[in-house]
Amino acid sequence: MPAKVDMDKIVSLCKRRGFVFPSSEIYGGLASCWDYGPMGVELKRNVRDAWWKAVVHERDDVVGLDTSIMMHPRVWVASGHVDGFTDPLVECKSCHLRWRADELEKQRCPQCDGELTEPRMFNLMFKTSMGPVEEEASTIYLRPETAQGIFVNFENVITTSRKKLPMGIAQTGKSFRNEITTGNFIFRTREFEQLELEYFVKPGTDGEWFDYWVKERFDWYVKLGIRKENLRLRQHGKDELAHYAKDCYDIDYLFPMGWSELEGIANRGDFDLTQHAKSSGKELIYYDAEANEKYVPYVIEPSAGVDRSVLAFLLDAYDEEEVEGEKRTVVRLHPALAPIKVAVLPLSRNEKLTPMAKAVYRQLCPSFVIDYDDSQSIGRRYRRQDEIGTPFCVTVDFESLEDKQVTIRDRDSLAQIRVPVEELNKILEAKLKGEAFDASSLWATRQK
Ligand code: ATP
């Protein structure tokens, strides 16, 4: 495993292989905005799906929700964002660059060492106006988090889902923050996608559910391949806690710029439901029929980012090694996250091989995300698949035409095995689920 991966290497791989491109690149790009290419969109979707599977589908106590990005402006007054979602901004008096005062090591401009203005609180919400008349009454915000859409729907979901507490509501979607300083590729951007769960519990049980979700969320990253030593839990100090939070842990990842937050898990108490009840005049409580008691639930919130997770998964999976005297770059993504699961590669673009290779492609297509590639040498095509993290390549060669067998190549061990085409789907399915590569007597294993 490499000691540490440079961000530059990941940025370059992402551009070269179609994971992430600068936004509006032909116009010179737009600061801190990025577009996900053909590989990136699959990886991102797989991260989102893996989260949804773990947090919603594999549980009977969590349901999903998809709320609008634009919400009633009073939501953001009640939640505290209009008054409190601010960062201290300073401006350099010489070069006029702006900085977040709390992130500066010394109170001088990091760019030109110029003198800085006094900090002023800068609200991070993007404002826009709804409807054709730009007047005060029509000012709305792009949501800076998906969580508030969940709180304002608490009553709707509780009554329609027939769930009892403890229960959770999960949502994924875009959020927007006019961050003063962005950077580190897709780590901090002004438009990003969140993965948020609000887990409602009876007050008094919140401590144990908080611990439960911290562990659950930490283990999710490990199960999907992130090395434990690159993750840590960090409890927020009293001075760092948001005004509503009783307790908060960050799951940090060792990014190239140092330990930084990947996900935050907060015990928000009853702050949000109480605020929205006060502000809307609607009662937001839970009635426990068995105990015949009413209460405002407490909420545990694991809040993660898709883009930051994509970056961490790529960094952790990136590897360079020497194989038979040549450098190989390989991205060892977990099969559940890999954009392409299997690549079908005829040994060469040859009219005799193509029909069989295409038939294998069509056979696999309904069950797996497949790439078919017959351009360039087989070595280059393997290299491309290694760099996009494809776990298995299936090669059709001239012998295949005779014996109806194909070769499967394993991305990580580079072992190759020959299997009958009719058993290919079953074998690949087992391999993608993690069955050992050399478990069957069919294997004629070639060690790297
Ligand atoms: P930070 O301290 O890094 O600004 P935060 O504590 O403000 O983050 P939260 O409000 O807890 O972040 O948001 C939850 C998650 O959403 C973060 O852990 C991160 O994964 C993601 N996130 C927040 N802001 C951004 C951003 N500007 N760009 C990309 N992802 C973000």
Image (cartoon, rainbow, N blue to C red):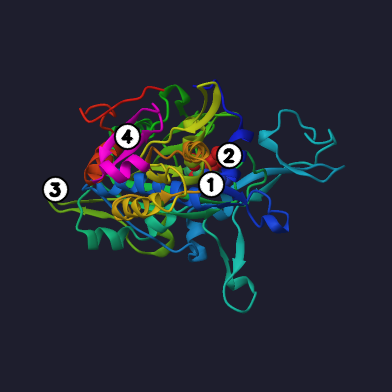
| Local crowd size for mark 1, using a 10 Å CA cut-off: few (<14), some (14–19), many (≥20) | many
Image quarter of the C terminus: top left
Toward the viewer: 276 or 124? 124
Q: Residue furthest right?
A: 94
Amino acid tagged 3: Ala
Q: Label 4, on which residue?
A: 216
328 displayed left or right of 394: right
Q: Position of residue 333 (x, y in %)?
A: 42, 36
Label number found at residue 291: 3
88 displayed left or right of 337: right
Q: Are marks 3 and 4 in contact (CB under 8 Å)?
A: no
Q: Label 1, on which residue?
A: 19
Nearer to us of marks 3 and 4 is 4
| Local crowd size for mark 4, using a 10 Å CA cut-off: few (<14), some (14–19), many (≥20) | some
Q: Position of residue 1 (x, y in %)?
A: 49, 21
Sequence order check: which comes first, mark 3 or mark 2? 2
* Residue 105 location, quadrant: top right
Q: Is residue 306 above or below residue 153?
A: above
